[in-house]
Image: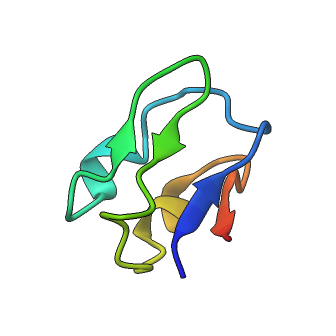
């Protein structure tokens, strides 16, 4: 199961360096590539608005 970033994302960038497999892409809201995501939850642990959630 991969994580998905919700519309709550404020594009702060804190999750980008936390992803060990570079599955997160920048955008108006950030996007997680489900094929790359290893479900580690590190993105969620640093997100100030809890935007990354298990899909």
Q: Is 13 located above or below residue 42 in the figure?
A: above
The reply, left or right, for residue 22 in relation to residue 30 is left
The reply, left or right, for residue 41 in relation to residue 22 is right
Q: Is 4 located above or below residue 54 in the figure?
A: above
| Quarter containing the N terminus | bottom right
The reply, left or right, for residue 51 in relation to residue 28 is right
- Colouring method of the image: rainbow
* Outermost residue toward the right in this view: 8
Q: Give the quadrant of residue 36.
A: bottom left
Q: Pinpoint residue 48: horizontal percent, then vertical percent.
A: 65, 47
* Outermost residue toward the front in this view: 35
Q: Residue at x 61, y 27 (%)?
A: 29
Q: Pinpoint residue 18: horizontal percent, then vertical percent.
A: 30, 57
Q: Nearer the viewer, residue 4 or 16?
A: 4
Q: Pinpoint residue 11: horizontal percent, then vertical percent.
A: 56, 26
Q: Residue at x 68, y 66 (%)?
A: 53
The reply, left or right, for residue 47 in relation to residue 39 is right
Q: Pinpoint residue 2: horizontal percent, then vertical percent.
A: 51, 72
Q: Nearer the viewer, residue 39 or 47?
A: 39
Number of marks in the image? 0
Q: Is 1 located above or below residue 48 in the figure?
A: below
* Outermost residue toward the left in this view: 21
Q: Residue at x 56, y 66 (%)?
A: 3
| Quarter containing the C terminus | bottom right
Q: Residue at x 41, y 26 (%)?
A: 26
């Amino acid at each position: 199961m991969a994580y998905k970033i919700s519309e709550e994302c404020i594009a702060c960038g804190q999750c980008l360096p936390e992803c060990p497999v570079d599955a997160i892409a920048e955008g108006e809201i950030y996007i997680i590539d489900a094929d790359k995501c290893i479900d580690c939850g590190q993105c969620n642990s640093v997100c100030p608005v809890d935007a990354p959630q298990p899909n």
